[in-house]
Amino acid sequence: MFRKVLIANRGEIAVRVIRACKELGLRTVAVHSECDAEALHVRLANEAVCIGPSPAPRSYLHIPALVAAAEITGADAIHPGYGFLSESAVFAEVCGRCGISFIGPSAKAMRAWGDKVSARAQARRFGIPLLPGTDALPDLASALEAASGIGYPLMLKASGGGGGRGLKIVRDAEALRRAFDGARAEAKAGFGDPQVFLERYVERPRHIELQVLADQHGNIMCAGERECSIQRRHQKLLEESSPGIIAPALVERALGALLETGYHSLGTLEFIVDERGDPYFLEANTRVQVEHAVTEMVTGLDLVAEQILVSAGGRLTVPSKQVAPRGHAIECRINAEDPVTFAPSPGRITEYHPPGGTGVRVDGGVYGGSLVPPYYDSLLAKVIVHASTRPRAIARMRRALEEFIVEGVRTNLPLHRRILDHPRFANGPMNTRFLDEALLHEADAS
């Protein structure tokens, strides 16, 4: 087992990893930029190191500073959290060369599954259904030729993208001409890789995830599904546990593909489910997900602790390949942003009172007096509830959000309340157009 873990991240996920490490008896090192010196994760860790100025490229994305912090403090492992360098095969390799364990899959597995074009190739090789699409496109002429064969509408996607970034919807050839060069430039600037590809666009899909976990001894399991269809501009806002949307045979095939490619650690396989109920592989995430707590609430697993244990060479603590979920869980992402315009709302939190009570969990990275800087993702906290049924979980989440007090910055709490109160949300099923069609369109009409 590791002795000391450096968390190469900030905010709620850094706090989440620190908590898991402490329960495992491990010492922790927080890293922080100059503006995060008083952040919650810094206060909770055993040690803290400033790694640079506030902009992420000079701190949380600066590999030499992170590795130096691990060496100075004697950390023998680095947990990357999500975002930042969590899916960087280069970072994993550098850690290995410096004798530091990277808590995640191998660099080879990350390259196989973390890159969208490569992940599509893996899915195709193992017979996992895919939407019609292309490999990486070298130029506009190739894109136009491929698009005419697939048919519009299409998604123009960055191979290295994630979280909805680097994605454009094109509905005709002229739109593709206008978008192509800009998409490549955005991909290069945002992910260091200009590669883009095309994929058939489904107008009203459901977004379903499989949570997987594998150790280095050939054991692998699916810890359940998540419904992630409540999104804005392809960014998730609310997630739920979902009951068996992906057929067991397809789950088994996906697990086999991961095993055969040498995958170990936590991972998520994301699927688009079209209007007919047919699933298609979308992408893989080779890291812990923001929404992992939904799965933890219905399974009783500590996924972050499992991730740490298997990275240290341990075996999965759950022997079965699939875990039966208990009840229903919902997660709301509470962001520091205007609930109408969605503009970020940085500032200092003057009052902070998270909800509590039976079946309520809050994973947060702030406290009363915290500074919310303008340099990073606006996520403040996640409210997760668990109940015996979905209607009871919805009622519990309504109650929890009513209790949540955040002053000093604006938040999207009002938007989440509107989602939960909408009849279409209560009756389901969801699709990724829900927010635009059921809420934002209504607001525009009024």
Image (spheres, grey):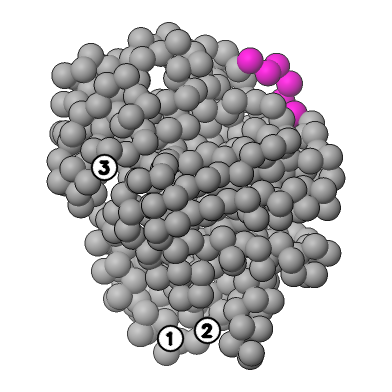
Using the image as rendered, state which of residue 264 and residue 21 is in the foreground. Answer: 21
- Residue 93 seen by the camera: no
The stretch in magenta equals 317-323
Q: Is residue 48 above or below residue 198?
A: above
Q: Residues within 10 Å of mark 1 (few under 14, many from 20)?
A: few
Provide the secondary structure element on which disc 3 rests. helix
The disc, 3 or 2, on the residue closer to the chain's N-terminal end is: 3
Residue found 48% across the figure and 61% down from its top: 411
In the picture of the structure, the residue carrying the numbered disc 1 is 175
Residue 171: mark in rendering: 2
- Residue 439 seen by the camera: yes
Residue type for callout 1: Ala
- Quadrant of the drawing holding the C terminus: bottom right
| Residue 289: x %, y % from top left | 52, 42
Q: Residues within 10 Å of mark 3 (few under 14, many from 20)?
A: many
Which tag is nearer the camera, tag 3 or tag 1?
A: 3
- The answer to if 43 sits in the magenta stretch is no
Main SS of residues in magenta: loop
The disc, 3 or 1, on the residue closer to the chain's N-terminal end is: 3
- The answer to if 318 sits in the magenta stretch is yes
| Residue 150: x %, y % from top left | 56, 74
